[in-house]
């Protein structure tokens, strides 16, 4: 199946609807052929996820609109080994050409699959829309070149001052913010006019769910795909050591009731401990693959 690609004309609302519809059909066809079951999880959530991104709402009681699909989807691995969902998420972002307060996400999880399986699947999904190459860039190797740190044998904790200085940021900037700034300044620009998969992500960011690669001090089995400077995919192998996960999540203030439910289910054997998962922003993939400059082109009926 050839990629839809940047040659597809999306100058009108009707053409944008047609492009997005075709892409969603291709995604569902691919995943169904690989044995993934499509499920629907609650958009209205009982608990805050502590990210500050869930808008409060009332539907027969107080709760929140989901900012991500995540744990509620993974919970279904107790019933079937491969699941996905395509649905609406909400965040109180200031709308701009790459952000919308309501957006569509594809999330998927697969039990007992490898990190390499997940990256290969992400590349297949991206290539449904984007025909170009996706070279892999090791973030860990770039940090080695920048700081002389070997993340196989040590963490970044002793190098935060040097990283802050390199980025011209205050020396007390939290590590997670330093890593975001480093990727934004050093690696995202490498994807302008092209694309790449950033892999070998370092420990210390805002993703406590990702497994620390065994035999390393600070390399995560986590990746992100960028097209023309825009993040369109993130994915990771789930941390199988629940104690380590809880410690890391609490360390960044992100251990919430939904994560507790997953930890309990993994510990009692209800949900498989070993799984991989990814998320794709549908409108972002559409705009990045076609060269459209504004995400609003792929949001319809905004007047409602």
Image (tube, rainbow, N blue to C red):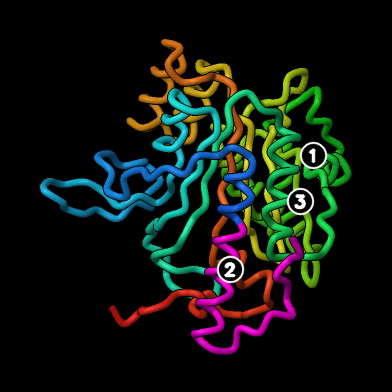
Circle 3 or circle 1, nearest the eye: 3
> Is residue 2 one of those drawn in magenta?
yes
**In the displayed structure, would residue 283 be above or below residue 75?**
below
Q: Secondary structure at mark 3?
A: strand
Residue depicted at 43% across the width and 31% down the height: 76
**In the displayed structure, would residue 284 be above or below residue 115?**
below
Q: Are marks 3 and 2 in contact (CB under 8 Å)?
A: no
Q: Secondary structure at mark 2?
A: helix
**In the displayed structure, would residue 266 be above or below residue 41?**
above
Residue at mark 1:
140
Mark 3 and mark 1: Cα distance apart in space? 13 Å
Q: Secondary structure at mark 1?
A: helix
**Whole-percent x, y for residue 205 in the image:** 60, 40
Per the rendered image, the range of residues in magenta is: 1-26
Residue at mark 2:
22
Mark 3 and mark 2: Cα distance apart in space? 24 Å
**Whole-percent x, y for residue 150 in the image:** 83, 31
Give the camera-side residue of 2 and 165. Answer: 2
Residue at mark 3:
197
Other-residue count near label 1 (Cα within 10 Å), few / some / many at <14 / 14–19 / ≥20: many
- Quick one: label 3 or label 1, which is nearer the N terminus? 1
> Is residue 100 one of those drawn in magenta?
no
**Whole-percent x, y for residue 284 in the image:** 58, 66
**Whole-percent x, y for residue 37 in the image:** 50, 39
Mark 1 and mark 2: Cα distance apart in space? 37 Å
């Amino acid at each position: 199946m050839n990629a839809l690609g940047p040659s597809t004309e999306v100058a009108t609302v009707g053409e944008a609807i047609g492009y997005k519809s075709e892409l969603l059909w291709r995604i569902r066809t691919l995943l169904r052929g690989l044995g993934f079951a499509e499920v629907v999880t609650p958009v209205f959530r009982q608990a805050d996820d502590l990210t500050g991104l869930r808008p409060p709402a009332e539907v027969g009681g107080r709760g929140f609109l989901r900012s991500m699909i995540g744990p509620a989807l993974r919970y279904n691995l107790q019933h079937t080994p491969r699941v996905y969902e395509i649905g609406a998420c909400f965040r109180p972002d200031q709308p701009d050409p790459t952000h919308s307060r309501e957006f569509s996400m594809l999330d998927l999880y697969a039990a007992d699959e490898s990190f390499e399986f997940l990256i290969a699947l992400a590349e297949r999904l991206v290539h449904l829309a984007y025909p170009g190459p996706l070279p892999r860039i090791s973030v860990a190797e770039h940090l080695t070149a920048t700081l002389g740190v070997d993340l196989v044998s040590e963490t970044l904790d002793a190098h935060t001052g040097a990283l802050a200085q390199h980025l011209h940021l205050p020396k007390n900037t939290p590590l997670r913010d330093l890593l975001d700034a480093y990727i934004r300044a050093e690696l995202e620009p490498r994807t302008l006019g092209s694309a790449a998969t950033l892999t070998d992500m370092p420990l210390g960011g805002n993703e406590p769910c990702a497994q620390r690669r065994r035999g390393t001090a600070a390399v995560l089995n986590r990746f992100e795909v960028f097209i023309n400077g825009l993040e369109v995919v993130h994915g990771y192998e789930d941390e199988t050591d629940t104690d380590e996960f809880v410690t890391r999540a609490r360390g960044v203030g992100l251990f919430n009731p939904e994560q507790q439910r997953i930890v309990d289910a993994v510990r009692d054997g209800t949900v498989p401990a070993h799984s991989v998962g990814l998320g794709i922003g549908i409108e972002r993939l559409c705009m990045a693959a076609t060269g459209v400059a504004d995400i609003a082109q792929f949001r319809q009926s905004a007047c409602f």
